[in-house]
Amino acid sequence: MASDSVHSRSTVQGKPHSAFYNTARALLRNKFSLCGLIILGIAIVLSVLAPWISPQNPYDLAQLDIMDGRLKPGTASLSVMIYWLGTDDQGRDLLSAILYGTRTSLLVGVSSAVIALTLGAALGLISAYAGGKTDALIMRIVDIQLSFPPILIALILLAVLGQGVDKIILALVVTQWAYYARTIRGSALLERRRSYVDAARSMALSSPRILFRHILPNCLPPLIVVATMRIAYAIMLEATLSFLGIGLPVTEPSLGLLIANGFDYLMSGDYWISFFPGVTLLVLIVAINLVGDALRDILNPRNKD
C-alpha cells in the first residue's frame, strides 16, 4: 500500500506542466520581469479604480478651478483638498490626472496591440499558407508599410480623422499590423513544412482549421514577445502624438498630453506639471520592456535544453 501511494504521488508530481505554467513560473523567477509585473499590476489596478480613488475627476470641467492652477505639490486648496502632486495650468489635480492618463494610455496601447495582432496574424498566416501571388501581394504591402516611419503615418491619419481615442487606436493599428504579419509569416513558413500539417491535409481538414487550430498555436511564442514590445511602443507613440497636440483632446488627458501641458512652464520653475507624468510614462514603458525582454529569453528555443 505504501509503495503504491508513493508511486501514485510520484506520477502526479512527474506530470509535465503546460507551456503557460512554465512561462509564468520563469517570469516570476526572473527578478527583473517580476519587478516589471508588479509595477504593471499596480498601474492596472490603480487605473481601473481611478474613478473611485481619484480625489478629482479631471475630465469634469465643472470640478476644475482656474484659481488653483499651477499649485505646488502638497498645497491645500480652499476646498480642503490637498494636491499631493500639485496642479497643472488648468487647476487639474495631477495625481488624479495621472491615474486617468495611465488608464487612457494602457487602454490605447493594449487595444491597438490586440487589434493589430489579430489583423496582422491573420494576414501573415494566409500569406505563408497560400504562397504564390497571395504571399507576394501581402508581403509587398507589408514592405511598403514598413518603409515609412510609423509616426509619419499616424500624423497623416490623425490629420485626416481628427482627435479621439478611437481615432488614435485606428492610427496605431495601421502603423503596427505589418510587424505582426512579418513575424508570424516567418514562423508559419517553418511550421507549414512540418509533418503534422501534411497529416492534417491528408485528413481533408479545411484550410482555416489547419491555419488557426494547428499552425497558429505553434507560432504564438514569437508573436507574444513582439506584442509585448509593441504595447510599450504604442503607449510611447500615443504620448508623442498627444504631446504634439494631435492625439487625444484636452478634455481626455493622457500622459503625453499632461507632459505637453507643463512643457511651457519648465523654465519658470513649475517642473511638476511635466515631471510627474513623465516619470509615470517612463516607469510604465520600462516595466513593459522588462517583461518583454524576459519573455524573449524564456521563449527563445535556443535557450531550451
Image (spheres, rainbow, N blue to C red):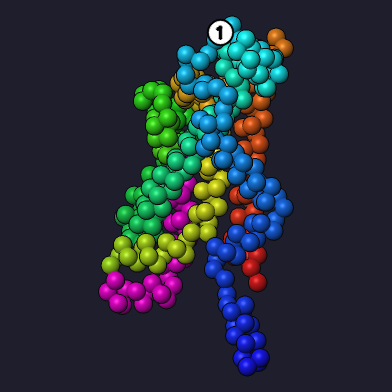
Q: Residue at 31% across / 55% down in the picture?
A: 133
Q: Residue 69: x and y, percent?
A: 60, 10
Res 174 → quadrant? top left
Instruction: Answer left or right for 140 relative to 233.
Output: left
Is 190 magenta? The answer is yes
Q: Is residue 128 above or below residue 177?
A: below
Q: Residue furthest front?
A: 80
Q: Secondary structure at mark 1?
A: helix
Q: Is residue 11 left or right of residue 138?
A: right
Residue at position x 41%, y 26% from top?
164
Quarter of the picture holding the C terminus: bottom right
Residue 275, position as x, y percentages in the image: 67, 23
Instruction: Name the image quarter holding the N terminus.
Output: bottom right
283 lies left or right of 242: right
Along the viewing direction, whichever of 23 and 298 lies nearer the viewer? 23
Majority SS type along the magenta span = helix
Up the image or down, 95 lies above or below 268; here it is: below
The magenta stretch spans residue 271:
no
For the point 51% across and 23% down, which residue is it?
A: 57
Q: Nearer the viewer, residue 288 or 189?
A: 288
Q: Which residues are magenta?
A: 176-205
Measuring from the top left, give residue 53's x and y in whole percent.
57, 31
Amino acid type at circle 1 is: Ile
Q: Which residue is mark 1?
A: 66
Query: Can you say whether 241 is above or below 46 in the image?
Result: above
| Residue 266 visible in the snapshot | no
Q: At which x and y percent is residue 182?
A: 46, 51
Answer yes or no: is residue 134 visible: yes
